[in-house]
Amino acid sequence: MNISVVIPLYNEEESLGELEAWIRRVMEANNFSYEIIMVDDGSKDASWSEIEKLKKLNPHVKGIKFRRNYGKSAALHVGFQAAQGDVVITMDADLQDPPERIPDMLAAWRKGADVVLMKRRTRAGESWLKRLTAHLFYRLINRISDAPIPVDTGDFRLMSRRTVDALNRLPERNRYLKGMFAWVGMPTVT
Ligand code: UDP
Ligand code: MG
């Protein structure tokens, strides 16, 4: 079984080295075969030269570079198209998502889940404004959305190959990924 880790990133030069080392530690400790796809969403800092260094250090690292900042959804979309794994895991580049949880995510997938969402226990470190706007956003979107959108789950998630294939077949150009996951409707656990 192959794991693709897809990471959209914008101006994350400071965390990329630590992120790669952290993921590599978990993958090697568990004997997983894997690729890390880092999608540089038009960073203005040294993120891309960091990625080039990491590619030399670790042949499992792949890099994609956007000419300008297209936004996280576009970066994820391109990462999903490049990913070759039997499962695809997405995470932030800013070290907020612990790769130690990956074996648990795989266990849930083996039990039959196509999508495994990771939920934050707390939003510690986020301002009251961010918490309030997040709360209001989910209330609003769930009033107007036909497919329920899970609350307070971030972008740390696992998807089965058939889920990624289904997403890759959707022709939307303005992609609200959380809504698209919900619309595709695969068996999901949190
Ligand atoms: N990101 C990106 N393009 C952007 C903005 C953010 O690829 O235009 C990346 C960012 O580097 C991070 C992920 O998307 O890896 C989530 O961003 P952030 O951590 O700022 O979001 P939050 O955790 O606050 O939802
Ligand atoms: Mg983040």
Image (cartoon, rainbow, N blue to C red):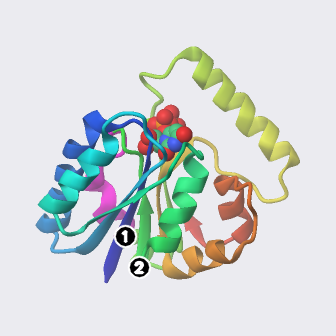
Residue 84's tag is 2
The quadrant in which residue 139 appears is: top right
Question: Amino acid type of disc 2?
Answer: Gln
> Mark 1 and mark 2 in contact (Cβ < 8 Å)?
yes
Check residue 57 for magenta coloring.
no
Q: Is most of the magenta stretch helix, strand or loop? A: helix
The quadrant in which residue 134 appears is: top right
Residue that mark 1 sits on = 4
Residue 155, horizontal then vertical, whole percent: 50, 50
Residue 19 visible in the current orientation: no
Q: In the image as oriented, which residue stretches furthest toward the top?
A: 128
Check residue 105 for magenta coloring.
yes
Residue 26, horizontal then vertical, whole percent: 19, 60
For the residue carrying disc 2, how many other residues have a C-alpha within 10 Å: few (<14), some (14-19), or many (20+)? some
Residue 6, horizontal then vertical, whole percent: 41, 60
- Residue ID at (47%, 58%): 157
Q: Nearer the viewer, residue 185 or 78?
A: 78
The reply to whether the residue tagged 1 has its Cβ within 8 angstroms of ligand 1 is no
Q: Nearer the viewer, residue 142 or 176?
A: 176
Please tell me how many numbered marks the rendered image carries: 2
- Kindly report the distance in space between the C-alpha atoms of the residues bearing marks 2 and 1: 7 Å
Magenta stretch, residue numbers: 95-106
Q: Mark 2 falls on what kind of element?
A: loop
Q: Mark 1 falls on what kind of element?
A: strand
Residue 148, horizontal then vertical, whole percent: 75, 55
